[in-house]
């Protein structure tokens, strides 16, 4: 089986930018060899409100949903969504000081479906561990 390089970044919610505290809320993954760009988002309002009780979680979710739309491209994804997948990944992972930020970009290799690699990264980097080490299934909000 042929391995393909991919790049990924963890999506971070930073409710109070001046405090630099964040909660991981998603992952972006780009696999140019397979023409893949995807994102998964999972928002835990309790964890976010622990950092900022006044956070507008619905507004945050709308902005996170826009990231998923840009990854998919096509109608309704705005000007960035019309770029090539790799250019969209770079635009989304650009450094910014905002409520939504990206981690540094990391590289890996996948030998199968990049969407499965994305799900694995979500389990590892975003979803909280459950007793016994599995991720909690009750709060992730599927990307639409």
Image (cartoon, rainbow, N blue to C red):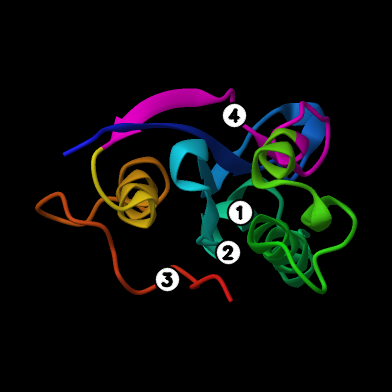
Magenta-colored stretch includes residue 143: no
Dot 3 falls on a residue whose secondary structure is loop
Q: Is residue 99 magenta?
A: yes
Q: Is residue 139 above or below residue 31?
A: below
Residue appearing at x 33%, y 47% in the figure: 117
Badge 2 density bin: few <14, some 14–19, many ≥20, Cα 10 Å: some
Image quadrant of residue 2? top left
Q: Residue 72: x percent and y percent?
A: 64, 63
- Counting residues from the start of the chain, the first of labels 3 and 4 encountered is 4
Foreground pick, 32 / 16 = 32
Residue at numbered disc 4: 103
Query: Could you tell me which residue is drawn at 82 percent across and 38 percent down?
Result: 98
| Mark 1 or mark 4, earlier in chain | 1
Q: Is residue 70 left or right of residue 12?
A: right
User: What is the spatial separation of the Cα atoms under label 2 and label 4, in whole angstroms?
Assistant: 20 Å
Alpha-carbon neighbours of circle 1 within 10 Å: few (<14), some, or many (≥20)?
many
Marks 1 and 4: which is nearer the front?
A: 4
Helix, strand or loop for disc 4: loop
> Which of the labelled discs sits on residue 45, or is there none?
2
Marks 3 and 4 sit apart, C-alpha to C-alpha, by 22 Å
Q: Which callout, 3 or 2, points at the residue further toward the start of the chain?
A: 2
**Circle 4 residues within 10 Å: few <14, some 14–19, many ≥20:** some
Secondary structure at badge 2 equals: helix
């Amino acid at each position: 089986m042929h391995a393909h390089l991919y790049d990924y970044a963890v999506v971070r919610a930073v409710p109070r930018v001046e405090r630099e505290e964040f909660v991981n809320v998603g992952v972006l993954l780009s696999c140019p060899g397979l023409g893949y760009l995807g994102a998964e988002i999972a928002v835990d309002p309790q964890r976010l409100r622990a950092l900022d009780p006044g956070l507008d979680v619905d507004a945050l979710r709308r902005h996170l949903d826009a990231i998923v739309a840009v990854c998919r491209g096509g109608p309704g994804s705005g000007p960035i969504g019309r770029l090539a997948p790799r250019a969209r990944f770079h635009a989304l992972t650009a450094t910014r000081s905002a409520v939504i930020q990206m981690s540094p970009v990391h590289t890996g290799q996948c030998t199968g479906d990049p969407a499965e690699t994305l799900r694995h990264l979500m389990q590892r980097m975003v979803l909280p561990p459950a007793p016994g080490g599995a991720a909690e299934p009750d709060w992730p909000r599927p990307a639409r």
